Amino acid sequence: MNQQTQTEIEAAAFRRLLEHLDSRKDVQNIDLMELAGFCRNCLSRWYQEAGQQQGVSIDKEAARELVYKMPYAQWKEQYQTPR
């Protein structure tokens, strides 16, 4: 497998992960952290850091919006449950 094909497969898997997380808004970040050791915020930070490694500046809110499919504040208001 060449590098471009691998990158395309990885990108497709990442998009599928985002779709899955979007379909499971009932799963809270704290649940993800406890069970998997990462959450949506971690994923957005990793995306931001990967951009920086490629010389692309992605701000925190833009990265979160990519992961949450909406502004983070809106997601918290609509879907985050009190603990």
Image: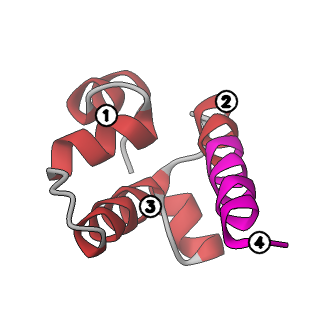
Instruction: Give the amino acid at mark 4.
Output: Asn
Q: Label 3 is placed on what type of residue?
A: Leu
Residue bearing the label numbered 4 = 2
Secondary structure found at label 2: helix
Residue 81 visible, this orientation:
no
Q: CA distance from mark 3 to mark 2?
A: 16 Å
Instruction: Please tell me which of labels 2 and 4 falls first in the chain.
Output: 4
Q: Residue under circle 1?
A: 76
Where residue 61 appears, x then y in whole percent?
Answer: 18, 43
Q: Which label sits in the foreground, 1 or 3?
A: 3
| Mark 3 closeness class: few <14, some 14–19, many ≥20 residues within 10 Å | some
- Label 1 or label 2, whichever comes before in sequence order: 2
How far is disc 1 from disc 3 in space, using C-alphas? 16 Å
Look at mark 2 in the image and give the residue it sits on: 23
Q: Is the C-beta separation of discs 2 and 4 under 8 Å?
A: no
**To which residue does mark 3 refer?**
43
Amino acid type shown at disc 1:
Lys
Task: From the image, give the main secondary structure of the stretch colored magenta.
Answer: helix
Give the structural element (helix, strand or loop) at label 1: helix
Q: Earlier in the sequence, mark 1 or mark 3?
A: 3
**Front position among marks 4 and 1:** 4
Which residues are the magenta region? 1-16
